[in-house]
Amino acid sequence: MNIEPNWEQAREEQRRLAQRLAVKRLTILLVVVIVGYVIGYPIYVNLMGQQQAAQAVSRLKQLTKAALLYTQDNEDRLPPEKYEDALAGLLHEASAACCPVQGDLFGMNPRAAGLTLTEIGNKSDLVLFYVGHDGVPDFRYNSFSAVSYADGTAKRIDTKVKLVWDPAPPAP
């Protein structure tokens, strides 16, 4: 009895095994990609929100510095609520007055507009400019917003921060 190997059958079996192995590898690769996306996307969105908030803080600092420069030439008065024209010549770029995400102008605290710096006692607490409109901050950067204060500082804030909109009279 002569047992001769059936080479054609062996090659066919090897092809089927290779195909099954390729399908398993593709399935594993697809699962890894999907899991990576599910895990990575929220991290990416969070990082983008932080980066956009940091950009807004930087622009608010520029805008607030321009407003403080404006006071030097205008009898210590802050610009009017519609500040665009008043500060246009003091900003390096017009985009410094705009939100980096939506491109809309930053809001100005209407209660601070036109006041003199000597009329404000709480400069480090009083909101001067903010991301939002009509006295309402917009938390568009993953539950964060950004504000600047009458003392020239700007910060990223969350919903828990208590904002001061009314200027306190200076201490006697």
Image (spheres, rainbow, N blue to C red):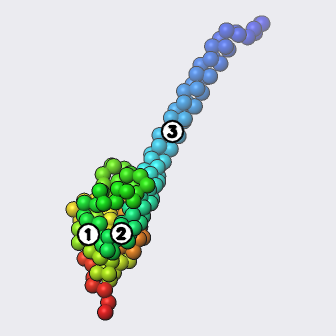
- Rendered image quadrant of residue 112: bottom left
Q: Which residue is drawn at 33% across and 75% down?
A: 76
| Amino acid, disc 1 | Ala
Q: Mark 2 points at which residue?
A: 73
Q: Nearer the viewer, mark 2 or mark 3?
A: 2
| Amino acid, disc 2 | Asp
Q: Mark 1 points at which residue?
A: 113
Look at the numbered discs 3 and 1 and tell me whether their residues touch, using CB distance below 8 Å: no
Q: Which residue is drawn at 41% across and 52% down?
A: 93
N-term-proximal mark, 2 vs 1: 2
N-term-proximal mark, 2 vs 3: 3
Position of 37 relative to 123 (above/below): above
| Amino acid, disc 3 | Val
Q: Nearer the viewer, mark 2 or mark 1?
A: 2
Q: Which residue is drawn at 46% across and 49% down?
A: 44
Position of 32 relative to 82 (above/below): above
Across and down, in percent, residue 25 comes to: 57, 31
Relative to residue 6, is residue 155 drawn left or right? left
Position of 9 relative to 101 (above/below): above
> Is residue 148 visible to us here?
no
Query: Residues under labels 2 and 3: Cα distance?
Result: 59 Å
Look at the numbered discs 2 and 3 and tell me whether their residues touch, using CB distance below 8 Å: no
N-term-proximal mark, 3 vs 1: 3
Query: Residues under labels 2 and 1: Cα distance?
Result: 15 Å
Q: Name the residue under label 3.
A: 33
